[in-house]
Amino acid sequence: MTRRASRVAAALLTSEPRYAGTNSVRAVNIVAGLAPRRPVCQKGELIPRDAASVEVAVGTGGQPGPPLAAELRKESGQVLARGRADGGYTDGVAGVPIPVVRRTVEHVEVCLRATAPGPAQLYGQANAAGKMTVAGKPVPGVLRLGYKRPGSETWLGLAPTIAHRFAQAKTRLATPVTFWILVSLVLGVTGLAIRSVLGEDEEERALT
């Protein structure tokens, strides 16, 4: 198998932690700082089915970040999930494990706080209003939030879940059958490309 074909196979079969979803916000601005007794909350979040952690984009200036706590609440105030994470992370992302969410839940408020002193600046986009509060007071900006699935999975193993989400799209064409037809076409084209590359390599070896 050629190097290109090996990369395609590896991409489909490599098992890694995968996202259940994100809120599609880019991590481009510092929008809030975390501190004990000053929870940062964001309302209007959609928590996808199978979410097993809440991930934030964070900056610590290269220093170990503080331990974190997360709480997810429905509009009624009912607590959907709680979780805690150890400190020690640095610049990049930090995830807080939560009990696995068994169904997609809309209009959720996600609250994060540090449980000990330490540097932690949260990233998102500054050009938003009416989404965030810090210590109960409204502030501008919106956090970048991601939701990871439990464990590790391959892209092929994740295909049934993607098909389910595809079917939830608000269009008549978005059905599981349509998704699998598209997957078959993509895999067919990928297979033809791999065969073409292998054929070219065989021709090159025959000529040398």
Image (cartoon, rainbow, N blue to C red):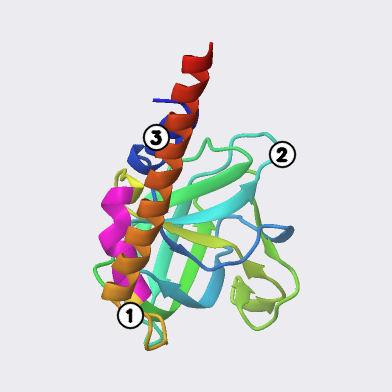
Q: Which mark is residue 10?
A: 3
Q: What is the magenta segment's predominant secondary structure?
A: helix
Q: Residue at x 56, y 47 (%)?
A: 93
Local SS, label 1: loop
For label 1, the residue is 78
The image quadrant of residue 183 is: bottom left
Local SS, label 3: helix
Q: Amino acid at mark 3?
A: Ala
Q: Which mark is residue 52?
A: none
Q: 187 left or right of 59?
A: left
Q: Tell me the quarter of the image containing the N terminus.
A: top left
Q: Amino acid at mark 2?
A: Gly
Q: Position of residue 125 (x, y in %)?
A: 70, 66
Mark sitting earlier along the chain (1/2): 2
Q: Residue at x 30, y 58 (%)?
A: 159
- 3 and 1 marks in contact (CB < 8 Å): no
Q: Amino acid at mark 1?
A: Gln
Mark sitting earlier along the chain (3/1): 3
Mark sitting earlier along the chain (2/3): 3
User: Which stretch did the figure color magenta?
Assistant: 156-166
Q: Which mark is residue 61?
A: 2
Real-space Cα distance between discs 1 and 2? 35 Å
Q: Residue at x 64, y 41 (%)?
A: 91
